[in-house]
Amino acid sequence: MQWKLNLYNQIHAMKNLFLLLTSFVIFSFASRAVETTSPDGNILLTVDLDENGTPIYSVTYKGKPVISESKLGLVGKNVDFFKGFEIVGVDTTSFDEIWEPVWGEYSTIRDNHKELAVTLKKNNPELDMILRFRVFDDGLGFRYELPLQDNVNYMTVMDELTEFNLPGDNTTFWIPGDYDTDEFLYSETLISEIPDEVVSRRGKHSESQAITDKYVIQTPMIMKTPDSLYVNIHEAALIGYPAMSLEVVPDSLLFRSHLTPDKLGVKAYIQLPFSTPWRTLLISDDARDILASQLILNLNEPSVIEDTSWIKPMKFMGVWWEMFTGGKTWAYSDDYRAKPGITDYTKLEPNGHHPANTANVKKYIDFAADHNIDAVLVEGWNEGWEDWRSYDKNRQFLFDKAYPDFDVDELRDYATAKGIQLIMHHETAANAADYELQLDRAFQFMKDNGYNAVKTGYVGAIIPRSEHHTSQWMVDHVKNVAERAAEYQILIDSHEAPRPTGLIRTYPNWLAQESARGGEFESMGGNPPSHTALLPFTRLKGGPMDYTPGLFETRLSTYGQGNNSQAGTTIARQLALYLTMPSPIQMACDLPENYQRFLDAFRFIEDVPVEWADSRYLEAEPARYITVARKDKNSDDWYVGAITDDNPRVATIDLSFLPEGQQFIATIYEDGKDASWKDNPQSYNIRTVKVNNKKVLKQKLASGGGAAIRLTPAP
Amino acid sequence: MQWKLNLYNQIHAMKNLFLLLTSFVIFSFASRAVETTSPDGNILLTVDLDENGTPIYSVTYKGKPVISESKLGLVGKNVDFFKGFEIVGVDTTSFDEIWEPVWGEYSTIRDNHKELAVTLKKNNPELDMILRFRVFDDGLGFRYELPLQDNVNYMTVMDELTEFNLPGDNTTFWIPGDYDTDEFLYSETLISEIPDEVVSRRGKHSESQAITDKYVIQTPMIMKTPDSLYVNIHEAALIGYPAMSLEVVPDSLLFRSHLTPDKLGVKAYIQLPFSTPWRTLLISDDARDILASQLILNLNEPSVIEDTSWIKPMKFMGVWWEMFTGGKTWAYSDDYRAKPGITDYTKLEPNGHHPANTANVKKYIDFAADHNIDAVLVEGWNEGWEDWRSYDKNRQFLFDKAYPDFDVDELRDYATAKGIQLIMHHETAANAADYELQLDRAFQFMKDNGYNAVKTGYVGAIIPRSEHHTSQWMVDHVKNVAERAAEYQILIDSHEAPRPTGLIRTYPNWLAQESARGGEFESMGGNPPSHTALLPFTRLKGGPMDYTPGLFETRLSTYGQGNNSQAGTTIARQLALYLTMPSPIQMACDLPENYQRFLDAFRFIEDVPVEWADSRYLEAEPARYITVARKDKNSDDWYVGAITDDNPRVATIDLSFLPEGQQFIATIYEDGKDASWKDNPQSYNIRTVKVNNKKVLKQKLASGGGAAIRLTPAP
């Protein structure tokens, strides 16, 4: 029936012919710069055309240059939206609105911006594009909009030519470009040093698709300019388009957008009308403003879920860390030839070190129920882990086939009786296509068995084999999963998915993502203390991370399995992470037996909320330190978390955010006098002091340490 | 979480090391030919190893060579199953069984064969393979079996090296290789002429992926040897593997298997244990045996559907041919920018020539109900046809969004009241990935609205974009669809799917496929009469075709739309096709108003069954003529169909198959005296004669003509 396309094409060609004969009246503004500012006037945005009719923009902050003249444009397969433009319309509007997120760092968020929409037109053939800018006090976003028009219906996007031309050689915190993973430590270099450093990091990626022909880094990234401005570049509302990275143009201080291609080299297949994601710049001379910024959420669409009453933030434990401490496996048996849905697993010999078994899960349920933890995740519950490299054999997991030692019914009843939710694990082995085929029945299986949340995973090379983790198809896929999950009232915590861009506003059931080097790496070389002092400036601007804090036994050598990895943290710092790495779904990642050893410290994890009425960033410097205070959404309590990098530090905690005239009991979980992440990570002290809003605490933090404080109104 | 793969790999490497140290005792037969024959002794199969330890086979029929010494083997990415083998085991067994298909040409099918299983082993590393041959009286099949073994778990198949070495320069009927379509007319050439003819046909494919660097033809193909043997090469039970084509090695009479690759160049991703599809040879010195052969069904697995009582063969009409006769469209409006699920179609201006509207569908329902037709197909019922090239814009159809003028509820009720089934159309625009995502809800929508059968379509380039219509992923996809449909008790008629290989036995709800140049091409240049005299020898050996017979108005010029195409057929021949192109789902493809003009001829379509108790091929020669008699499965009636090519012919219809002593009324639908497909296609005559099993009818067939006979026991 191939002919049908030809038949259609004939009709279509006739139509285009007709349209080309139609004339259009163009109101030309000729070329002259248009400007707008942020509501407070600090940010000045200028948009113009260069001599080739290519749109250009520049940005200043309090008169200091942030972005020098930089080009904008899109290139399609047979058409370009890059040059030959005239400006035919300029609209400037103001917007000021308060909205309420379902959960998050604030109970209300203000969206106050000025919008500048620049309508561009070119001829031969006539093409229309709108550049839409929104300028906030803490930065700006802009996107390309291709409206319905006569000469383009669908377009194969070959490139996006967005430039970020930096006026100075900024200090930059970045991870290398990779189409398939972002689980890296950060480099801290000048822009001019990025190319050499990118090259030196090549070959150190594992199982990933490092980009080897360009100098590419990922967003979100943050820079500090020579005159001490902080600038974060990222994107918002990534839907129907590939993820954007930044390509450093050698011997320049210029970044150009670098979209993840599919394996055929195409960036995106779009149909008009179409809007790209927003390209975002967070800008301030105060690093705390970067952390406090809700700009990326503001650029996302409101929730598409009308009734959000079923969306409940939670803390959870998991049958998971056992597999990192050595000797335990996701797999039930050692028969690596077992095939889900085909092999009779009851006939396999159990390997004896499979913790996702009914008795062990009950142990976690018991501990969670006793210690104010809402849920228990179980990894390795379903058939297929014996050898799960999906890519090489075309299919791996089924999502309704439990291992013989995991009793779905019994655990459902046991968890329900104890008031504990179970979180299901859907490791797709990166066979996203197969996951879509199974999706409805996988979610139905969850609902039938009392599961309301799922941790998804995409480890390995993606199927469809034309795709990368961050190509357009996968961006669509994770949105499809979030949407479909919402229909079943299922919460999502996605791992190895495209890096987040604030879509949690639109899909508030998509609680968190991994999408960075998380706590699991403490068992594989460790994360230096600076890592968690940087992530809130970068990765977390896209949305919450399932970082998995709460590690109390930081030396893997204690397990006697030959792993000498050590976590870059003290116990007190782990508690502080619940404040500095906010998420509506927070793990207590360690083993129950480790928590039993430090129950007084675990008390903080029991108490700490996962959604907030308000947040105050008190101190901040990327990769150095963060001090934050947050008010519980459901009580009058406040909490404070402070962390530092390798260097010991005294955090200054000005309690003036507390309500006037009210005494508070501060329970302080702090590093012991002799604590340090390296030599004495388990030394901590818990003390109680009475404070009020006049008090300024001077809180000592050890090397790699931190402090966590609960502030409760005094009776 | 990329690390997990590494972790696993370490464990896996250790395991392999252990296994390599284990020694195996090998019982070697050394190299000596092993043989077996067909049950009747006519076919002799010889299997041996050549000097490189490569398996070879050869075949004779009644002492005449059919396949000269030909190599066998598979090549994986890091391993080969091609050379260095020893034969370590030979098993010969006999099998004779009668089984009952759910529907088909016969109510029972005999599976009588001798099986030869040759176990091969090689060292460094040790690898095991079984070659399994099944030799029937009418041909043979063989496949590669890779059992569970220690040194290979999964394998990336890079090539299959099956050879078909022909001892003579056979006359060959073939269509050119193409990974995405098989909708071609056949070439009739010597093997030696294939390369030049393949080249001359290049560039004439439209919208397809012609293979340009090799001389490739598709299966099923049929050859006639210089000493008048008929040999059909195809495959059976194509599951989990790409479709096989045949590559002609230039300057030889050698075909080599050519598997459809994915766009990364890989043929298949498999996990052991694994068996390839069967490579099949149908062999006889009587062309009628090729038509009667059930060998390919016998090599497929029995039905996986236990309760098949809901599977009912059917005849149907369709809102479909109107779109071919000119001026009518699948699309509801001419707004080619409309987007399903986004555009409000009720606000679009209807184009006024959209036949999938409620009133028109009722007209078809009325006609069907009045004339013993079971069902009505409606194409163009759902949103999205305005511009439906999915590949270029990443998504097109939704399968639960009807156009505003198609009232799902009203038509369900109307059809039900009239006792007519509605057949849904799922055109995926080749976005198979998206179809899988929608599959459960699409089928649920069907069941909710009374649809029990679906015509699927895959027009265009496949998404996932790494795939072709016949690559492994798509082979899996159509199986997934058939399986999922069975769960919903839905019948499938698939168009643009991989060519059939007898899977109808395993999935009897998969009634038919297109997978060849069908009746629709009568509106696009026409099909020469030889085409339908050849398809039963080739395409139909894989399974029934939804050819869409029943065309009464054969000259498209009558519609005054500038289309001067003419069908290569008379009306009488169209009736005969219901016998010569057997299918459990047969269309009456023409417009009700055309049938109104020839209601006496249409009576045959009303009467003819779609499932049979028995079939007798009376005369046959590929691309020349076919005469077949079939007994109705549900009555004592017999039916006869006879067709010829361009040449007028007298069919000899020996009625000795009729039961002894019973008189029959033969109603003969024959070409008029002056009929010919070209000049007088609508001239026909209907006459009645009394006959018995002693009678031999001499039935005249016009150029491009045919005859259709109903034989009813005389009262």
Image (tube, coloured by chain):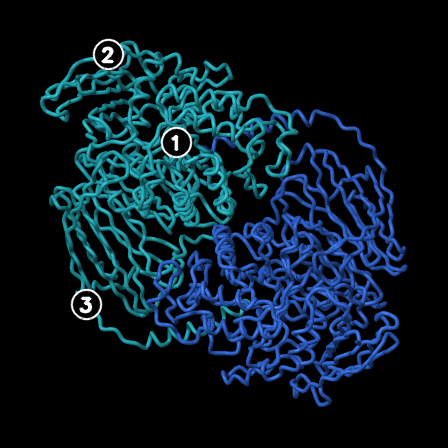
Chain colours: A blue, B cyan
| Circle 1: element type | loop
Q: Nearer the viewer, residue A441 or B507?
A: A441
Residue behind mark 3: B28
Quadrant position of residue B15: bottom left
- Relative horizontal placement of residue A29, taking residue A361 as reference (left or right): right
| Circle 3: element type | loop
Chain letter belonging to callout 3: B
Tell me residue A308's x, y (percent). Answer: 66, 53
- Relative horizontal placement of residue A383, taking residue B250 as reference (left or right): right
Q: How far apart, in angstroms, are the residues tagged by discs 1 and 2?
A: 33 Å
Q: Nearer the viewer, residue A252 or A681?
A: A681
Residue behind mark 1: B517
| Circle 2: element type | strand
Quadrant position of residue A282: bottom right
Residue behind mark 2: B687
Placement of B561 over or under A401, stated as above or below: above
Q: Amino acid at mark 2?
A: Arg
Q: How far apart, in angstroms, are the residues tagged by discs 1 and 3?
A: 50 Å
